[in-house]
Amino acid sequence: MMTAAVRGSRRDRKEARHAEIIEAAFHEFAAHGFAATRLDDVAARVGVTKGSLYLYYASKEELFDAMVRQQITQTLIDDTPPGDATAATAAVQLAAVLRDYYDRYARDSRTRELLRLIIAEGGKFPDLIEFYHHEVFARVFAGLRRVLEIGVARGEFRAVAADSFVLVSFAPVLEAAIWRLVYTDRYPLDLDAHFALHCDLILNGLRTR
Amino acid sequence: MMTAAVRGSRRDRKEARHAEIIEAAFHEFAAHGFAATRLDDVAARVGVTKGSLYLYYASKEELFDAMVRQQITQTLIDDTPPGDATAATAAVQLAAVLRDYYDRYARDSRTRELLRLIIAEGGKFPDLIEFYHHEVFARVFAGLRRVLEIGVARGEFRAVAADSFVLVSFAPVLEAAIWRLVYTDRYPLDLDAHFALHCDLILNGLRTR
Amino acid sequence: MMTAAVRGSRRDRKEARHAEIIEAAFHEFAAHGFAATRLDDVAARVGVTKGSLYLYYASKEELFDAMVRQQITQTLIDDTPPGDATAATAAVQLAAVLRDYYDRYARDSRTRELLRLIIAEGGKFPDLIEFYHHEVFARVFAGLRRVLEIGVARGEFRAVAADSFVLVSFAPVLEAAIWRLVYTDRYPLDLDAHFALHCDLILNGLRTR
Amino acid sequence: MMTAAVRGSRRDRKEARHAEIIEAAFHEFAAHGFAATRLDDVAARVGVTKGSLYLYYASKEELFDAMVRQQITQTLIDDTPPGDATAATAAVQLAAVLRDYYDRYARDSRTRELLRLIIAEGGKFPDLIEFYHHEVFARVFAGLRRVLEIGVARGEFRAVAADSFVLVSFAPVLEAAIWRLVYTDRYPLDLDAHFALHCDLILNGLRTR
DNA sequence: CATGAATGAGCCTTCATTCAT
DNA sequence: CATGAATGAAGGCTCATTCAT
């Protein structure tokens, strides 16, 4: 039992180290981008020597890759579908879904930084942007498409082109995220007002007459 | 006079060299980001030696800064206001303005790459994102605000919050640009359909009843 | 008695571990040389962790030293004098001695690899080449000298300079070993023909008229 | 003319640098082997910074390769055939050829060091040992074969197997080189006596009766 | 103006060695 | 005994920057 406990804790400690490194890597990579971050700094943030990182990840690339995947996965670990399925109208559902996306993708700074990395380093890591699409955009669009279909089926919404709709209706969320990424301090964005007008326009735009 | 002429042509040649270097720098920086581009590659693209770059720009940072500013300025060298001021209705004007923005910011690959650099390197070059805001977003938002005001004045549009409106109505343009930046090849975006639905939703959303 | 037995088996196990490590070290060092072999690889070959090696040898140098000494000693564990002392003529004896040396130093790949290490790393390990001289060359030369003396005493051989003779007469053996070390695959050496001509020339060269 | 002169000297200086680096590399590689030599030391020997080496050679491997090839080529730049073609007898010719080989391969320390590198690093650089064979052994053996054929044709030498003869007759040269490489200081080899007995045995061994 | 050799700081990666468990 | 995580000192290679020509 001792042995089992010791082994267990060893594995646990290793898991924990992995997590610590990922966390440190996230901060450094997010702050400086792939090329400009120094593994020295990542290690220092963990409180470990540079060489130790190589006990966990075989290269800077692998660390970056693992970090991004883990951040994406962790961000979406909440697999509860967005929105409020019990809502009376599709309009309320759509608003709930959008609010959910704002919370996940625009309000959370970690998600924003991840987005920056995807945009900035996507060219060098095609697998990662694919993964990001699969885990993030695909789900987001699926959610929006579902609400649209419900609303159309109920006669609440006009039958617009779904493929474009999911993109166009998500755009202000993405924009809010990017805006905060780039201009947070200098030109603050009032997220509530942004969300309010976003819903207003979309819902009025979709409404049947 | 000879001397002046010679001096003039010399200055011209120097101007031309500047332009060549900026152009080469744009391609390299856009492709690899600030940290990962090598001045060697920029120089090779110009057909010149690395050392020569320092006759024109004092450092990598300065070259990057000059390049981004020049690209921004050149992109906006067309100072004609967007849209079609002669249009009969504000709705048509708004559509014209949006179409104009799509052409400038989503369809043109150079503008997209510039956007990536702003997002990716903004943290390291705060003056540049400020400049970008001043030259790009400020103008864009001013254009949208004007049309909104016209439409409201004419009773065509509802009087929505202008600050949010300019952002929300521009969002699909920005999104299209970023999407093409990241997913061009894998998940193509139908820009015409995107634009069409964008206008549809916005105009229907704005319309007074 | 139990204790003694246990201790004994423990010591045996320790001896066995030593042998395993030496064996693994031989393969790695022979394949890559001193500087380029990794203790990780040696340990992996034993099926043990790198750290464990330090329970047996205090450093890479010591392991190398011990390995070479052990290989030399083991190679010569057969202390039977070379050749055939009962042979009728010194010529037959000489041929028998040479055959013996071919078997020991040219045909056996382990001996060849050892030779490479002596040549390659001798500068860094002077004690080892001294040991090699004492255990290998000194014996080889003594054997040849003895046969020469017998042949001269019997009037079969001319009285050539013994110091040079032992070297010159051994040279083709050494050459065969080195050739196989370097060119085994590309330019195979017919050891039997080599040996035959070697004997032919030496015996004819030594013969009194 | 100035320009041409300047350009010329620049190229010359670059050539000279190449030569200096090769020379320094030879000393360091010969002293420590491939893996254990530090480019820092090579650079220091040239009186230059480590980074400068990369202006001339793309990697440590390439430098090593170039160095070995250049040393081999330079050693054999003397394309005069070995021996003394005007000699009266094949025996005298053979002795002259062998003396020549002793001078080239056993007396010259540079050649010996090269040999050590071939033996030590051959496994890692198969092309180099091939090159060495082509430039060194092939020529050496061709020289010996020619003299043998002449001697046989004249009835001076017995018609022994040529393939083995070239190897066996060269062996003492190789051995002398290796001996000096390994045991120079501790067990000096009297090269003249070695050569004398070598010739004595070979010539007596070859002679027809 | 332009070159290109040279620099030197710095970064990623490796690996012999140590040590708490 | 054995482990394996951790260290830290290098070492190969890169690249922005300088400068004599």
Image (cartoon, coloured by chain):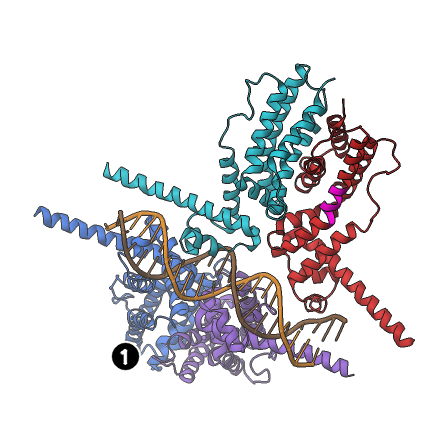
Chain colours: A purple, B blue, C red, D cyan, E orange, F brown
Residue at the left extreme, as displayed: B1
Q: Which quadrant of the structure image shows residue A5?
A: bottom right
Q: Which quadrant of the structure image shows residue C163?
A: top right
Residue at the front extreme, as displayed: C153
What residue sits 29% from the left and 66% below the top? B82
Chain of the residue that carries numbered disc 1 in the rendered image: B
The foreground one among B17 and A6 is: A6
The foreground one among D167 and D15 is: D167
The foreground one among A174 and C97 is: C97
SS for callout 1? helix
Q: Amino acid at mark 1?
A: Ala
Q: Position of residue C131 (x, y in %)?
A: 70, 53
In this rendering, does residue D135 appear at all?
yes
**Rendered position, D177 above or below A167:** above
| Dominant secondary-structure state across the stretch colored magenta | helix
Mark 1 — residue? Answer: B153
- Dot 1, crowdedness within 10 Å: few (<14), some or many (≥20)? few
Q: Is residue D167 magenta?
A: no
The foreground one among A102 and D117 is: D117
Residue at the top extreme, as displayed: D154
**In the rendered structure, which segment of residues is drawn in magenta?**
C135-142
Q: Which quadrant of the structure image shows residue D107?
A: top right
Residue at the right extreme, as displayed: C1
